[in-house]
Image (cartoon, grey):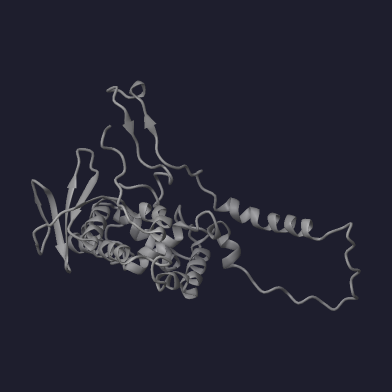
Amino acid sequence: MRETEQPTVRHDTSWARRLASGLAVLCTATALAAVLPASSATAAGPGGQAVSGHGYTAQIRRTEYGVPHIQAHDFGGLGYGYGYAFAQDNLCQLADQVVTLRGDRSRYFGPTGAPSADSPGTSNLVSDTYYQSLRQGGTVQRLLDRPAPLGPTDQLRKVVDGYAAGYNRYLHDTGVANLPDANCKGKPWVGPITSQDIWNLVYDVNTNAGDAGIADLIATATPPTPAAPTTPATPATPSAPAAPAARAALKALVAPAAASSAGPELGSNAWALGRDATQNHDGTLLRYPGYTQPTQQRGFP
């Protein structure tokens, strides 16, 4: 089997497994426990690239096909190498998503602009209203405040903390003005991220098939207009129940909003090609295709 399959990090809690789809969107890496020498800077060598800082240390080794494998002596280091490697390949995508999650798209791209491919809503203003309401509601923080297993384990928290630090280290080392991707090179909306940004992203991924489909309705909801006094209505008879009509009305209300945010159909797992389907007649396992390639929530790398 060729080494084009997506690497993975293993976590040992049910809460982490429920969030696995979100973490896979961020990035993935093969975690191999190893004690690495301390270093205060990045360095490339026969064993790959050593990255360290703020108490984290990791070794990034890439295969012939560019797949990163991360070695570290603790979970914080795994996250650090994890975030650094992902930033090397996909910093612009994650930076753009962080702007969305912070509800700042109108600030940088204008309120009437179309949100990014993965953002719910029909405009940046709608997207911002939706995400700022989520932040003000404090849902993600309440989940984080729960002890394991209802909340993240200490290991998973360390991975996410290290991930944010690794991403920020790459951005510091490279500089916004020197980023290789012209989509975000020198842009004012690119900057350091926090662990909270990552947790917000994990939560957001898990709502893609839920609230995100009706983000317009949530963001533009208004209190009902008080009805004028009328004569008492005749109670509905058992032969004419109101429930089916109410369900039909709700479906008609939600359908346009859901359709407006619908993107390419999602898949799951992977594509396996037999020897008859490949040029060199070797079997090949391709990437996890749950999210489409052009969007921010695509698989790593």
Residue at x 64% of width, y 72% of height: 222
Image coordinates of residue 167 in percent, x first then y, are: 25, 61
Between residue 211 and residue 272, name the one nearer to us. 272
Whether 203 is drawn above or below 301: the answer is: below
Total tally of numbered discs in the picture: 0
Image coordinates of residue 63 in percent, x first then y, are: 20, 41
Between residue 114 and residue 35, name the one nearer to us. 35
Image coordinates of residue 72 in percent, x first then y, are: 18, 56
* The N terminus: image quadrant: top left
Residue 147 placement: quadrant:
bottom left
Residue at x 50% of width, y 63% of height: 127
Q: Is residue 286 left or right of residue 227?
A: left
Residue at x 38% of width, y 67% of height: 148
Image coordinates of residue 226 in percent, x first then y, are: 76, 77
Q: Is residue 148 left or right of residue 238?
A: left
